[in-house]
Amino acid sequence: MSREPLAKNEDKKERAFSLHSFHMKSTLYIAADHRGFAMKKYILSFLAKEKIICHDLGAYEYDKNDDYPDMAQTLAKKVATSPNNKGILLCGSGQGVCIAANKVKEVRAALSWNIKSARNAKIDGNANVLCLSADWLSKQEIRKIVHVWLSTPFLKEARHLRRLKKISQIK
């Protein structure tokens, strides 16, 4: 599978099909701390316009004293209940929620900063949680990253399956 972005004329058609397929198979969750709160609302808005159901797990209101590990743990535990579940986490850098989410068994959280990193997280690592920086990414960048991550399949090549098995055996 090519790792290059789709041509502009293919992008919308491919994205619509792939996002529809995602919607039919998976449950999507989203959560953010105070620094990711506004961007989370933006993501929920554009996903709703595209008829993708996304369950908001908080923060439900802006609170500068909330802590990203709480949001990450809540979402990661939901994602871990089914192999079809996926999640999107946001904090200032994206790194904190990623570290916290990866503490939950069966979660493969990946920090993505562009469409290539998002695509690679799914193709090679079958990431089930996408972590994003609300401070360092624009709305347009986040929208593209989310679309690519949601529409990219895991390739299930032997070498990736072998590596994921090894990761799952780490205590």
Image (spheres, rainbow, N blue to C red):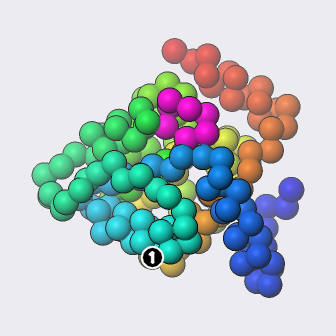
Q: Amino acid at mark 1?
A: Lys
- Residue 80 shows up from this direction: yes
Which residue was labeled with disc 1? Answer: 139
**Percent position of residue 106, x then y:** 54, 28
**Percent position of residue 97, x then y:** 38, 45
For residue 148: magenta?
Answer: no
Which residue: 61% across, 56% down? 23
Which residue: 67% across, 41% down? 125
**Percent position of residue 150, x then y:** 62, 57
Q: Secondary structure at mark 1?
A: helix
User: Magenta span: helix, strand or loop, mainly?
Assistant: loop
Foreground: 89 or 61? 61
Furthest-bottom residue in this view? 9
Figure check: 171 above or below 26 = above
Which residue: 61% across, 39% down? 84
Local crowd at mark 1 within 10 Å, few (<14), some, or many (≥20)? Answer: few
Q: Which residues are magenta?
A: 79-86
Q: Is residue 102 left or right of residue 100?
A: right
Which residue: 67% across, 62% down? 20
Q: Is residue 171 left or right of residue 122?
A: left
For residue 82: magenta?
Answer: yes
